[in-house]
Amino acid sequence: MTKFFKTMTLAAAFMGSTAAIAQDVPRIGAAVYGLNAEFMQLWAAALEQHPAVVEGKVNVTIFDGRYDALVQQEQFETMITQGFDAIIFVPIDIEAGATAVEAAHDAGIPVVGSNTRVNSDLLLSYVGSNDVQSGYMEARYVLDQIGCEGGVVIIEGPIGQSAQIERLEGNMQALAECPDVTVLEQQTANWSRAEAQTLMENWLTRHGDNIKGVIGQNDEMALGAIEAIRGAGLDVNDFAIAGIDGVTDALMAVKNGDMASILQDGAAQAQGALDVAIAAVMDGYEPMSPIWEQYADMPWNGGTDAEYNVPWTPVTAENVDALLEMRQ
Amino acid sequence: MTAKTHRQDFKAIAADYGQRYGILIALALVCVALSVASEFFLTQRNIINVLRQASINGILAIGMTFVILTRGIDLSVGSVVALAGVVSASFATTSATAGIAGAPYGFYIALSIGILVGMAAGWVNGVLVAYFNVPAFVTTLGMLSAARGLTLLYTGGRPVPSLTPDYRYVGTGDVFGIPMPIILFAVVFIAAFLVLSSTRFGRHVYAAGGNPHAARVSGINVKRVRMMVYVISGALAGLAGMILAARTGSALPQAGIAYELDAIAAVVIGGTSLSGGVGQVTGTLIGALLISVVNNGLDLMGVESYYQQVIKGMLIVAAVMLDQARHRHA
Amino acid sequence: MQPLLEVRGLTKSFGGVAALSDGHFTLHPGRVHALCGGNGAGKSTFLTIVMGIQSRDSGTIRVRGREVSFSRPSEALAAGVSIIEQELSPVPAMSVAENIYLGREPTGLFGRVDFNGMNANAQDLLDSLHFRISARSLMMDLTVAELQLVEIAKALSYNAEIIIMDEPTSALGEAQADELFAAIVRLKEQGKGIVYVSHRLSEIFNIADEYTVFRDGRFVGEGAIGDVTRDSLIEMIVGRPLTEEFAKTNSPTIEIVLQVAGLNAQNSVKDVSFALHRGEILALYGLMGSGRSEILERLFGLSPDLGGEITLHGKRVTLSSPSEAIRHGLAFVTEDRKVSGLNLMADLRDNICMARLNELSTLGIMRRTREASAAQRMIDAFGIKTPNDKLVVSGLSGGNQQKVVLGKWFLTEPGILLLDEPTRGVDVGAKREIYRVMSDFAAAGGAVIMISSETDEVLGMADRVIVMRDGRISGEVARDALSANSLLHLAA
């Protein structure tokens, strides 16, 4: 076992070998819930492209939680044993991971949350985006498009997940402002494009022309709805459709005029969290990520805020090309 | 032969018919109930929806029927769906940027690649099961993991977008108003039906599943038959993967998760015995349709999707109970 | 003396058809009573009612003079009636003692199983019966005969007085059967009553004291074995007078069709050489494990080539797979039709056509009319009793199932027929038909190699016998020199 860890440390040292002496720089672990989907891929890529990492000021290791709360917990134990200096944590769910955070806190390792909240007051700080806000923004877009009247459908994430709960809260805030709008259907498609497509096909059969707007709680599901509308031989332009996250396919759909998307800036969440984590272990550190200049609404404040709110960016015909460019 | 054995035969036959037509009757009853409950159920558009929604699972389930008939199981189809989808789709997009977009052969090459990827995965399963005697459950469980891993490696976890219109034709095109997935489903069904009912290979499949020892003594190459059924299942998973990618508009590395379970469910509901040797693709067709009809009907009635899972679970258990009852009589 | 078991006027019908219309049976203590009858004579119905598996329509059953009505087998067991079934169902990974006390393990503190006490009790029981089996050995390490002895011990552990044995020797060789018979004799000495069901008449004459015959669900007759001849018992079972039991019409020629030289096979079969002539029925005789079946498996390409030469009609052949053997005109009726002869889930037609699919298809497409007419031809040729060829074969009687296997092989138009225990589990009437088929086949220019554990059958049918011992040929006996003694002498 000891030998194994030695090898691990050695490997980590090699990976971060742009620094002259790897052992001297702080080691920061990033425990993310899973790397199978595009959003977290972008998040992880941004972390590795952070100037502090590129210049070798810190050493970053990413742990793939494989969508399992228990795996994440075990990875925390590994990081504590190996004496990481700080941990960035993206839990699978708001309720999962409080124990892990507590264990790290007891070992004196600061934990910075990113993207998804943890139900724990032991987090040093949280860098993420407010899902209630995005839920409100996307619903507001749909309602504006249909003139605050008619029928809409809501395609939800997995019931009980924090993102679903908060985005729905935002959806409902916007809907409350339009009393003439009826919610015809509201069901989960588990973030899945294929499931949303089936759901939308069946809803179109039942409600036909009465559906004016589609509120998809993520882009994948909104894209599934678009395919269902096309499959039924209808015109996508007759529907107001919105999603959240700004995945590449959605950006292209926006460019095409099919839908609206609210970009969740995963890159900013990752880089922001890393800056906060470095500040916690390095005295007098000044943030190196360009995001602090990009988002004037989110002041650095010495890296000591309990919460940093990365603003949402509505994807529009104007900024979509630039955003797509960044993805290449 | 005496009265007693005659009666047993009669019971066995009655139970057999009861089961085969039982599932058809169940489908008919569900359809009648749904057409009363929802005025939209029997509309042309909805019927096309149900068939289209059944097509991917139906194609997988037909491949699964071959495997289960030989006493095997293929847990890897969901992962093979994703692998074949991303590989064929990436080929279709690259050929577009390479300037041969629109050329019909570009599409056919992508299609062949998708099916070939599925066949290759199936071939590995088949060789391990037939020639190395690794239990099918273990082999295909391994492939479930390995194929998913390869998919993620191949794509880096990101979807393969911008599919060419030629490629998308597999999922969104139509012939005389009948969507392409339904046509492919029908072609696969008819081919599988003919293979199982009227070819020598079909007889080999039933014999190798019914009693592998007796089949071997009768001069049938049981190992080759076992290998072939996994190749068939893999090829159909490849086709299903392309239909899925073409329907949803991009090949997602997360596609097809847990699809093997629905495919097995359709086969089991359709009356194919998990102990091999007994079953028809007609049963599988009805099983796949029943699952789709129930999902569709509950959507139309606005029932929450979690209930659909409960109802599907009850359907599977009920079908197996029927199967068990039949074995007790026989 | 009061009978142990007395059954009078037992009836049972299924859906208006009588399966048993007059069940009549009397068993005395210390006796072995053979229950005889063809397949479907009503024996199984009778036994299942006595054991409480099925209910009766009318009639009385008395155990030691007390009228009983069992509604489940456990009640019968509690009253001292137990059955040793044709197909045993041991738990293979458990010990002998655990199997004997399955479901009623003696327990100690906190419900912990008292293994020491259980093993000791089981060993005492086995020793008292003179069974040389360790209570601690695993069931999967035992032979079929030993499994049966364990079943007997299990029955006695319930203090059974009446022990029903349903075809107990169907899976045993001659030596193992002798072991079983010795056990039966000891049970008799202890005053137990044994109901013995078997198709093998020689066994009945060997072991039974009394007989009862059922035919078509009716009681036909009973009496002491000493008062009946073999022929008259057969007549009672079959219901009509019989001509000779072993119909033999063939006579061997001098033309050699198969020559085997220095053949090795699995399970240390070494250096086997013999010739088979056109028109000949050659028997391979020997104890279980003497290598008889291994020779046939090698000849049919079911086991790997371990050396030796095989010459068919003067040409060297390899015979490395069953399909190659079939192409060379060999056909193999295996020892156990349920394990390797039939696809029990398929119908008659598919079973009959199974070894002939190449010829019944064109470019891989099956020709249904050819399949149907081929199946019908075989059904007619063998007199298989079935309403049609779409009946699943698991519903057929043992004799009819065996005829389906024969039909499958005759459809391939073989030149050489390999038969491993061709009449096992088949009733007297069907046996005679199988003998007739064998001898007609040889008479028409075919050649037969048969294996049989029934000495009578070997003596009745074989033109020549090769006796095997420990994987080698220990002797060869021509028909005119055949006797049970000479065979046993060479085999043991």
Image: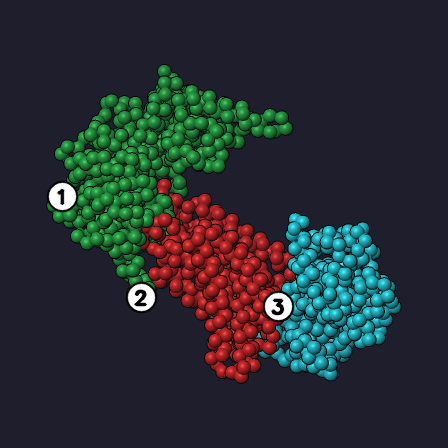
Chain colours: A cyan, B red, C green
The kind of residue tagged 2 is Leu
Name which of mark 2 and mark 1 comes first in the sequence. 1
Task: Bin the neighbour count of mark 2 within 10 Å (Cα to Cα): few under 14, some 14-19, many 20 and up.
Answer: few
Task: Bin the neighbour count of mark 1 within 10 Å (Cα to Cα): few under 14, some 14-19, many 20 and up.
Answer: many
Real-space Cα distance between discs 3 and 1? 76 Å
Percent across and percent down for residue C180 are: 35, 27
Residue named by callout 3: B156
Q: Nearer the viewer, residue A231 or A220?
A: A220
Residue at the image position 32 percent from the left and 48 percent from the top:
C303
Residue named by callout 2: C363
Residue named by callout 1: C252
Residue at the image position 32 percent from the left and 43 percent from the top:
C266
Q: Are marks 2 and 1 in contact (CB under 8 Å)?
A: no
Percent across and percent down for residue C438 are: 21, 44
Percent across and percent down for residue C372 are: 29, 57
Quadrant of the rendered image containing residue C254: top left
User: Does residue C320 sit above or below C420 in this rendering?
Assistant: below
Q: Chain of mark 2?
A: C
Q: Element under label 2?
A: loop
User: Does residue B291 sit above or below C344 in this rendering?
Assistant: below
Is residue C486 visible in the rendered image? The answer is: yes
Q: Chain of mark 3?
A: B
The kind of residue tagged 1 is Pro
User: Does residue A145 sit above or below B129 in this rendering?
Assistant: below
Q: Element under label 1?
A: loop
Residue at the image position 50 percent from the left and 77 percent from the top:
B107
Foreground mark, 3 or 2? 3
Q: Element under label 3?
A: loop
